[in-house]
Amino acid sequence: MSRTVIYRARRIVTMNPGNPFATHVAVREGRILGAGSLEQLAGWGAHDLDERFADKVLLPGFVEGHSHAFEGGVWQFPYLGYFDRAGPDGTISRGLRNIEEVVARLREVEKAMPRDGSTLLAWGFDPIYFGGRRMDLSDLDKVSTDRPVVVIHSNFHVLNANTPVFRKAGIDRSTNVHGVVKDATGEPTGELQEMTAKFMAYKAAGVQLASLLSDNEAVWRFARVAQLAGVTTATDLHNELPQSTVDGYLEASAREDFPIRLLPAFAAGLVPLAEVPDRLAGLVKRNNEKLRFGLVKIVTDGSIQGLSARMRWPGYYDGTPNGVWNVGPDEIDRTLLAYHRAGFQVHVHTNGDEASEVALNAIEKALAAAPRWDHRHTLQHCQMADASQFRRMKALGACVNLFANHLYYWGDVHYEKTLGPERAERMDACATALATGVPFAIHCDAPVTPIGPLFTAWCAVNRLTASGRTLGEAEKIGVADALRAITLGAAWTLKLDDEIGSIETGKRADFAVLDDDPLTVDPTRLKDVGVWGTVLGGRVFEAPRRA
Amino acid sequence: MPEPGATPIPFTVIGGFLGAGKTTLLNRLLVAPHGRRFAVLVNDFGSVDIDGRLIVAHGGDTIALANGCLCCSIGDSLATTLLDLLERPDRFDHVVVEASGVADPGRIADIGGIEPRLSRDGVIVVVDAADVRARAADRYVGDTVLRQIAAADLLVLNKRDLVEDAEATTLKTWLEGIAGAVAVVEARHADVPLAALFGLPPGADLHPAAPACEPAFRTWTFATPHPLSREGLVAVLDALPSPVLRAKGFVRFADSPGRRALLQRVGRRSRLDDEGAWGLGRLVSEIVVIGTPDMPSDADLAARFETAARPVVDAAVLSATLDRTR
């Protein structure tokens, strides 16, 4: 029999309502024997008492229900965002507060690159905080006039480039193309949008970008970024799972020191429907303790801030025409039904409320065609749902994972431009989910926003935008409910609530080790609670001390 | 990768809602005896139905045909698929992309504007004559369908046999209300005049099967040794009615008589690109016009184009001409 270890902590918040708080937790064979007092746990027999968490607070390991391993890929490029962000090694990339700072940072990076004319690619840039000033060709020409420089915006739908890129592509004032942004005099500004941006990004850095997802190092970087935030289980919620990726994930997850449980969701729609359920069933057979195939993802629409979400009447507040379907309603019905019949759980990306409606229609039709208990199909993002849609979710047995981080990062834009006050104030409606009884989680969608469940919980509790506006007093939830959403709530939406999400007998010994007690700090400071590290299956992963 | 300065490859996007007949059209294109090498990018390999005897190689994401055409599966990224294609050593005469059933084909065609190895040829949108009105009124996809129609340079009114003539006329008027004076080609089973859609050399035997509804198309050629007035030609092109489906040719303008311009017109969209010096070629402007049988008569077309070709004799033209004969 393996050793029993009893950890003492300042406090253990279990998320088990029958035994909510404890001082000790006993671990054997990577699983929890029980939580309680030392006396209560001593009955399990011989044990080692581990005091290293004596001044720490333990919570169930955080569960990130909507993230992408792509987060690990982008960190091989310099980060240019407005907000501080922690990289895989724990160092903080400082936020850049104006375009001059962005240019200065790029010049530093450029100087360190080999003189071979290779492309400088960077990510995370977001000009919405720069008071209307956009980046232009002359800014990036200050970085280099011979090396191609490409800056991908934080939304991954827009980019800026320098003159060498434009010259090579033959883009000039005579180029009359939708995605090429021009100034008042008709000259291209250096910004490319949507399809042209995507094409140019791949063209400039195709080899590097294509390798991001199949790169074995990327999944390690992703796992480390997640671990630093207290996450022990994270999804990779859209992956076509080519063999190289499957092999990389199998290899990584077999290693003792791989710090998270990883749940890739198969990207439905990229492979002919007839072949997939079998292929996915084959992958499920290869699951191990730290790698779980079996989730399916359908992407229905675009994003609200990208003006591509599918919205119900009356549409965008600023009059922008309705967004775009990624796949049409008929195809959503067909795809969801196929996986539903095959017994899989489907996660449906729906940003706009029309997309949510179509997803709910699809679930309803699938249930009529093939009744099934406890399917837990989950609406992902679901940012605009109103109370009636939550009632439908409840009636259909669906779950929801709300994009709480949006409140902070884009809440002001939603209030002023995309949704208008009323709908912005009810977006990511955690309180409505709670009141309606829809099982729910909250998420970050990394790399769209940084992975950090305590920050995400802070968003759901405080609903503050970047400018400090409170967005929807009525949809705020309490700290305890928010903490449940990032642990047991998320575990439920992944059908893992029997295994993880709370600290109780029989579950896996997955803990978030915190410097402070999130239930006693001021709720406005929730995001600032330090993460010491994690425990995964009884193995301790200390986060590197941050600079 | 082609050498720098190689002629860009015409780039066509086929749009249209699910079930309109895009795939049928592409299947025809891949196997028709047109003698040209098409690279066709499709969404769903499974729906490509090609006689196995015509396939010379079947890779994971590509099917190579005996006639030199290539069919590629788009997978998760059109951008990467297209870039991979352009990096292949084999050179294609035309690249065709099948837009997904809900995509805006106009946005995909934008790639033709920023990739120097491609030149935007046109957006062809296929609509189902029996179904398009209902789709356009659909609560969820109506605006998507209307956007597709509005993006078209040329519309294929497919499944024409499923509606009466009167209804087809009403449909065409309705389509023009959305897309403007756009060329509309009627078809059954997506059996379209490929030359009209893709600008194949006229005279090639493109229509081995019986014509669908009516004789496929007419062609007419304009040739003149006189340099053309740029404004005059643009006015003529702008005034061409919608039954003119395509025009292509080399033009010598009076304002730059030593240089050769390439004219390409798909549907209602024309573009003129400077191709450099004439070199040793004959100093003759030559424009081939392709259209439905309803396009203006040969005499009418001749009258229109000749207005742009009034003899211009000025010093610049004369010296450019003399330079070459010296």
Image (tube, coloured by chain):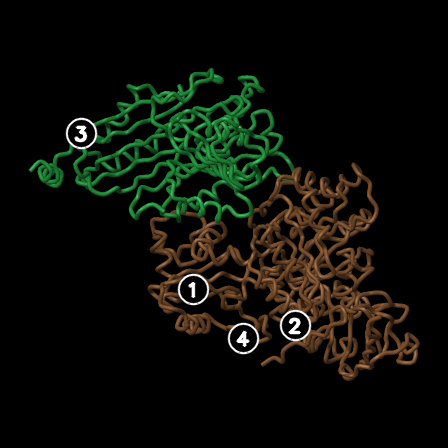
Chain colours: A brown, B green
Classify mark 4: helix, strand or loop: loop
Characterize the local packing of mark 1: few (<14), some (14-19) or many (20 or more) Cα atoms within 10 angstroms: many
Front disc: 1 or 3: 1
Up/down of A45 relative to A409, above or below: below
Query: Mark 4 and 1 residues: CB-CB less than 8 Å, in contact?
Result: no
Q: Nearer the viewer, mark 3 or mark 2?
A: 2
Q: Chain of mark 4?
A: A
Q: Give me the disc on residue A120.
A: 1
Q: Is residue A258 above or below residue A383?
A: below
Judge the density around disc 3: few (<14), some (14-19), many (≥20) Cα neighbours within 10 Å: some
Q: Amino acid type of disc 1?
A: Leu
Residue A531, given in percent of the width and then of the height, sits at: 69, 76
Q: What residue is pinned by disc 2? A: A228
Query: Within the image, what quadrant is residue B283 found in?
Result: top left
Left or right side of B283 for B4? right
Cα–Cα span, label 1 and label 3: 51 Å
